[in-house]
Image (cartoon, grey):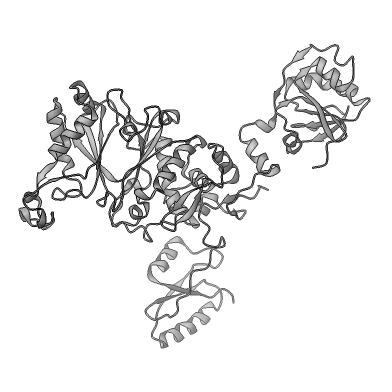
Amino acid sequence: MTPLPDGLILVAKRECPTCALVEPLLAELAGGQPLTVYAQDDPGYGNGMAKVIDDRSLEHSYRLNIEVVPTLIRVEGGHEVERTYGWHRDDWRRISGHAGLGAQLPPLRPGCGSRTLDPGIAEQLAIRYGDVRFASRAIALGDAEDAIEACYERGWTDGLPVVPPTRERVLRMLQGSTRRPDEVIGMAPPDLAPCTVEKVAINAVMAGCKPEYMPLVLAAVEAALVDEFGMHGVLCTTMFAGPVVIINGPAAKAVGMNSGVNALGQGNRANATIGRALQLVIRNVGGGRPGEVDRATLGNPGKYSFCFAEAEDSAWEPLSVERGFARSASTVTLFAGEGVQGIVDQKSRTPESLAKSFALCLRAVDHPKLAMAGDALLVVSPEHSRVFIEAGWSKARLRDELTALLTFPADDMLAGAGGIAEGLPAALAGKAVPKFRPGGLLLVRAGGGAGLFSAVIAGWAASGPTGSTPVTREIAT
Amino acid sequence: MTQQTILLDPTAERAPSARPRLARPATLDGLTVGLLDISKARGNVFLDRVDERLAALGIAVKRYRKPTFTRVAPTALKQQIAGECQVVVEGLAD
């Protein structure tokens, strides 16, 4: 870019009525001091009355930081002295030094937005002309190469198509967070590779996230990289588990997450892509791929993406509050979970009856004859939660009742008992055993308003300190 | 002319961005070698000789033929070769 030309600079576009209004003034403006006109859309602007530079590439407009057209700038000694935008007769007269300029025009007309600020343009210009630098390797595709197929070829996808991570998309994604792109948020397993905000943004683009999801994605990745969550083990286990992401607080509503009808299913962009972004980070940054370090015997479809929001209710403490955060806080909780097992109970109208139903179904986690192996996430639907809430049962009360109902004599569950070789070790004979370890039963309210159904999401059979412990992180901006 | 597409690498960049060729097998023992005739003149002469040499070494060989050298192989043929062989040899010119 050459230095600023001395004299007057006018930036305009033909389609702006105010630019058209001032067009006849160009001859007068060009008399006296030099005038340089940058035309954003039509190099014929000015009808030959002044030196017009074709700025359809918007390079000059970008470098001049133009937000509104027309913008009139006075330059002396290569430096900008003053600028005005829109048509303000007094300002234009002062800046141009033409005392009688535009006498026939109205005193004031607002301008129009600069083309540099058109949707999608700003990022292109920042990459082309600005000082945007990415730490990640740039991969140039062949002219005839299909970008989505190129992502498959390079092994970057989970089997579904990804959004190709162009620089413009990654820049927009990074703008969804205030965190620096080079900040390392943790070491991604299994390779224990440094995971930067930029790498998360690239994978969030591929997952289909909007930039506004970035704080949620970052919190989810951060939670996955905390040692207690044991992401390496969750990934490499032959068992079913994958990270289940539960969002609490105002952030869920702000990005339009689904906590209602089909909350655990398909159809909501935020639910679908936030969970997917986390899995793509593990795959691409961590190097965790099925058949390599991911040794799951069967896996589960939630390993594409498993993310939903709690349907918070004033009468029941949200999961985030139970886990020590303020109700006003937005959080991500990660749970190493398997698939969804439905609980159908359309007849219980008392909390006692429904709690017994829940307990019976929860007993099947891992195996009815196993205990204190996998945690469980119980997702209580609104119609079921109403049974408890109307009877005055808090979430904590329900958990306590379930804990009591889920304490069993070990004798019935010992290996070999009931003619089934699987079971608890003989050393537990004569004792009472709780189904879940302390803190191993999580309760969340979610789902549509119709349906006396709830769901058990069984945890990894290596739940707890030896394997995976649920982790909650506050969502920052 | 469209602008070249540039993507940012989503990985930890531990592998070169130019993907290496598949590693060549150290030995052909126990492998099945496919000989693909692309229907170019005298390619069969070359492949017949390769076939003789491999057979003399006791290596399993399967023969395939593309309908014409001017087009890529039909999908069904590619799938058949991929399912039946670990190594493929083709003669590219006459």
Q: Residue at x 13, y 37 (%)?
A: A404
Q: Report the label total.
A: 0
- A30 left or right of A398 in image: right
The location of residue A46, given as percent across then percent down, is 84, 27
Name the foreground residue: A76 vs A431.
A431
Q: Quadrant of residue A38?
A: top right
Q: Is residue B75 above or below residue B44?
A: above
The location of residue A285, given as percent across then percent down, is 47, 53
Q: Is residue A384 above or below residue A441?
A: above
Q: Residue at x 48, y 83 (%)?
A: B50
Q: Residue lying farthest right?
A: A32
Visible in this render: residue B5?
yes
Where the N terminus of chain A falls, by quadrant? top right
- A460 left or right of A73 in image: left
- A291 left or right of A92 in image: left
The location of residue A361, given as percent across then percent down, is 16, 40
Q: Is residue A178 above or below residue A433?
A: above
Q: Residue at x 7, y 49 (%)?
A: A412
The location of residue A436, given as percent across then percent down, is 20, 44
Name the foreground residue: B71 vs A227.
A227
- A195 left or right of A129 in image: left
Q: Is residue A304 above or below residue A384?
A: below
Visible in this render: residue A347?
no
Name the foreground residue: A136 vs A25.
A136
